[in-house]
Image: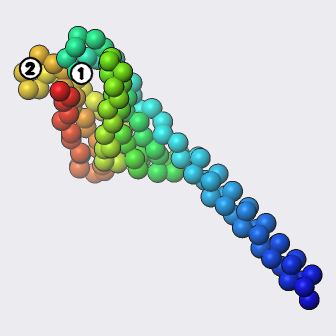
């Protein structure tokens, strides 16, 4: 009886290990991709900063990004990050919207049908 019980516990243990491995394998497939990368001065120091928009697709082959983030690597080494709303094909424009002689970021993220998420970001 003890051998049978030991065998049952060992079998359960090894099955649980394979289930955990499968969960981690599924998470690794959901990596962020770089949607856009621009070199623009957005901090006002007259040096180009690197601005990334990154996203994670809802599933393989989908065009909807369930997670979208903005990442700025400033010329002074600082990194700024912001989580944005999910959607399709995020677009970024660099314009001086508040007339302070420094480029601001205007991000549009279509969310479906006629809805669009619009975000105005400036770093100071």
Residue drawn at (13%, 22%), measured in percent from left and top?
Answer: 96
| Residue 116 locus on image (x, y percent) | 24, 45
Furthest-bottom residue in this view: 1
State left or right for residue 24 relative to residue 32: right
Q: Nearer the viewer, residue 102 or 37?
A: 102
Q: Which residue is mark 1?
A: 42
Q: Count the marks.
A: 2
Q: Residue at x 45, y 32 (%)?
A: 34
| Residue 50 visible in the current orientation | no
**Furthest residue in direction top, as rendered:** 46
Q: Please provide percent x and percent y for residue 8.
A: 83, 79
Determine which quarter of the picture holds residue 42.
Answer: top left
Residues at discs 1 and 2 in contact (Cβ within 8 Å): no
Q: Where residue 94 appears, x then y in whole percent?
A: 22, 23
Q: Which residue is at a point 20% across and 28% down the rendered structure image?
A: 123
User: Would you identify the image quadrant in which residue 18 lies?
Assistant: bottom right
Q: Is residue 18 visible?
A: yes
Residue behind mark 2? 100
Residue 71 in which image quadrant: top left
Compare residues 14 and 59 and report the one nearer the observer.
Answer: 14
Please say if 39 is above or below 114.
Answer: above
Q: Is residue 50 above or below residue 17?
A: above
Q: Position of residue 64 (x, y in %)?
A: 41, 47
Please rate how many residues cluster around mark 1, counting C-alpha atoms within 10 Å: few if below 14, some from 14 to 19, many from 20: many
Name the residue rendered at 21%, 41% in the picture.
118
How far is disc 1 from disc 2 in space, using C-alphas? 11 Å
Give the side of residue 96 with respect to residue 90, left or right. left
**Between residues 29 and 58, which one lies in front from this camera angle?**
29
């Amino acid at each position: 009886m003890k051998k049978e019980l030991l065998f049952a516990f060992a079998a359960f243990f090894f099955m649980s290990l394979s289930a955990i491995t499968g969960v981690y394998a599924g998470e690794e497939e959901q990596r962020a991709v770089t949607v856009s990368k621009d070199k623009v001065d957005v901090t006002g120091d007259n040096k180009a900063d690197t601005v990334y928009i990154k996203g994670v697709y809802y599933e393989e082959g989908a065009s909807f990004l369930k997670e979208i983030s903005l990442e700025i690597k400033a010329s002074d080494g600082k990194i700024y990050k912001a989580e944005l709303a999910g959607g399709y094909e995020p677009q970024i424009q660099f314009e001086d919207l508040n007339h302070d002689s420094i480029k601001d970021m205007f991000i549009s993220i279509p969310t479906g049908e006629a809805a669009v998420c619009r975000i105005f970001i400036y770093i100071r």
